[in-house]
Image (spheres, rainbow, N blue to C red):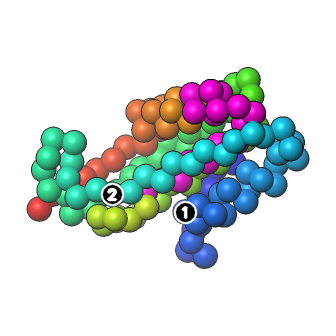
Amino acid sequence: MIEKNSKEKPVTLGDMVAKVKAHPRFSEAGMILAHNGVVRETSRDGKPVTGLTIEVDHDRLEQILAKERARPGILDIQVYIQENKPLKVGDDVMFLVLAGNIRENVIAALTDTLNQIKADATRKTQFFQ
């Protein structure tokens, strides 16, 4: 499931973990792993950043999630991305929560899912001082 940005109650990392724990096969899980991406004050090349916006290709995101959820040992993957709104330094950008059977499967799936989302399903625009 992909959480979409809403004007209602903000999604929290705790909400995401609760969704994963509600999975009907959660008793098979041995690990939940979470990523909480935030806006940092500098770009990768060291330029001061005042904020950013994120655009999401939802079709590509769904493809990535479907593929990664089918990996051996993975029970569920939840993602929430703060899209199409100005974010400032320190704001949450993305929550990614995975549940699976053993750490080797879950860590690899989180890494691969995160890298694919960032490379293929989102576009970031940074604002500089």
Q: Residue flagged by tag 2: what amino acid is it?
A: Val
Q: Residue flagged by tag 1: what amino acid is it?
A: Asn
Whether residue 12 is visible here, answered yes or no, is yes
- Percent across and percent down for residue 120 are 45, 32
Please name the residue that numbered disc 2 is placed on.
Answer: 39
Q: Quadrant of the C terminus?
A: bottom left
Instruction: Give the residues in magenta.
Output: 93-108
Q: Residues within 10 Å of mark 1 (few under 14, many from 20)?
A: some
Q: Residue 100 appears in which quarter of the rendering?
A: top right
Query: Secondary structure under badge 1?
Result: loop
Name the side, left or right, on which 26 lies relative to 58. right
Q: As drawn, which residue projects farthest toward the bottom? A: 8
Q: Is residue 83 above or below residue 124?
A: below
Residue 5: give its label: 1
Q: Nearer the viewer, residue 8 or 57?
A: 8
Name the side, left or right, on which 46 lies relative to 110. left
